[in-house]
Amino acid sequence: MPARPRQKSRPNADLAERIQSILASRGLTLYQASQRSETLYGRSSPYFVPHNLYYDLRGGTFSPSIYQFVAFSRITAYRLSDWLRVFGGDLENIARLQVSLSSPRTILLDSSLTDPYAWVPWFRNRVGNVPAAPIAPLRQLLESSRPQRLRSLSGTDKRGFVYAKIGYQDALAFPDLLPGSIVRVNPNTPDEPVLGANGISRRMFLIEHHKGFFCCHLRALGDNVIVPVSTQPSYAEVELRRPHEARRLGIVDLEIRPLLRAEQPEVPKDLAKQWKPRPLSREGKVGPLLRNARTTMRLSLRKASGASRKIADILGDDRYFISPSSLCDYELLNTAPRHFQTVITLCSLYGLSLQTLLKAIGIGPEEAGREPMPDHFVSRFLHVESAEEPDRELEGGGFLEQLLERCEEVPFFLRESIGPLSGLEDASLDDFLWIGGKQDVLHPYLVNGLLALVNRRRRRPFHFASKPLWQQPLYVLLRRDGTYLCACCGLENGTLVVHPYSQHFHRSEQFRYHHDVEVVGQVVMIARQLA
């Protein structure tokens, strides 16, 4: 996400006119909306909408508070997220920023903020396509179709999965899961883990405890005691009693792994030494909530403020910056943030869900409207007419339908995060490969693989004999016969040598570079299922 030039509050007559049009669509004037807000909340309430709002907006000296946005939403019955979008606020930025910022501790990603009325590019099966090869570019299997509203694709994102981002200080499952990896957690699973011969669960779980979240294998001691088990790093083994000291959120069943900038995990002192579990907290007030969230993320006030500066640079707006003194006031004085920019920054920094923070400052979801604004009010893009009509290919059983069935859910909330995860800001269908048809793979990261994203500009292969497996780059190769190969490889005296990392025996294949094989590019991201 390249930084855009920063912008501050400025006179905006167009914004005032747009609000006037939105209110008029509900048969309201600003005076009537102001009167209703006074009736509902009182004139001295932070929810009160002033009758001179247009004047303040045109002067560039006023920005509505988050409470006033809720009032607008309730009075007009339009969704809160749409009202924020009118003023330039996009709640989907929360998940995008959570993915982009380096996170010391594992956090839950807020996947609930995806706009179901947004238009997204969509695809269809190529006419007359043959069964998919074990490894094949998506361009050979799919082609661009008409844009679709997300709600028309509701069957692909309503499974109730939870998503988390692995931190670099609590990567207990390293190298099975890398710091920065996005994992999907299935909460609809049996509560008791299936244990292996050594008493450790075969699958990885996401658990919550008072220090945050762990994504790891578990050892069960009795009915209600679990012990998080680390693989390579030496984290302390601590007994956690359920449900007071820990709770299981589900089984990890999918990983989206960025490969370009893999981080070496750290083992902080507070997790390396034995620590005493405490009951899970359920803070109700905003001050304790923010303080606990910040300390869980291992951020000082100064570091948190510095991270907010990065958010302001990314979004091109200084109003997303929060000074250390303001952060301190929110915690010590139990002060509620006034501006929606501050709310977005706090959720992004501390891994908080929007609903959790709004509830802490006294705003319940029942207070806001539920109807979407018309597209032209919130700048949704309608590319074609009748785009919600299903394509004829969606009714068949081609590659697209098989891929969606195998994925179970499409994480649409990550659609703007491909750039931060992979380093490719302009990724297209040409850069994605299907890798899910090959069983005997040459690298453990390809086991149960689904899709790979390839940087086609990185075409010179390197193999580092001194680096561990998780740091070895992966490449996609195109053989002369038109088939594809995904493996680690390097050049040796003009010969391309494939280095297999497999549970089964494979001889190192050798190819004449540029004669027998071409390097398509380096794999920078993989989506794979976890058995």
Image (cartoon, helix red, strand yellow):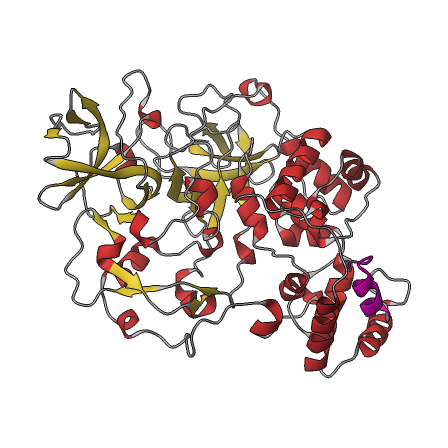
Residue 3 point in image, percent of width and height: 58, 43
Residue 46 point in image, percent of width and height: 84, 60
Residue 161 vs residue 342: left or right?
Answer: left
Residue 275, by quadrant, is top right
Q: In the displayed image of the protein, which residue is found farthest to the right?
A: 44
Residue 293 vs residue 414: left or right?
Answer: right
Residue 102 vs residue 89: left or right?
Answer: left
Residue at 60% across / 32% down in the picture?
Answer: 211
Residue at 31% across / 26% down in the picture?
Answer: 472
Front position in the image: 293 or 348: 348
Residue 95 point in image, percent of width and height: 55, 48
In the rendered image, the quadrant that contains the C terminus is top left
Q: Is residue 49 visible?
A: no
| Relative to 260, residue 133 above or below | below
| Relative to 417, residue 443 above or below | above
Front position in the image: 288 or 260: 260
What is the tally of numbered marks visible in this picture? 0
- 60 inside magenta stretch: yes
- 507 inside magenta stretch: no
Give the extent of the magenta segment: 52-63
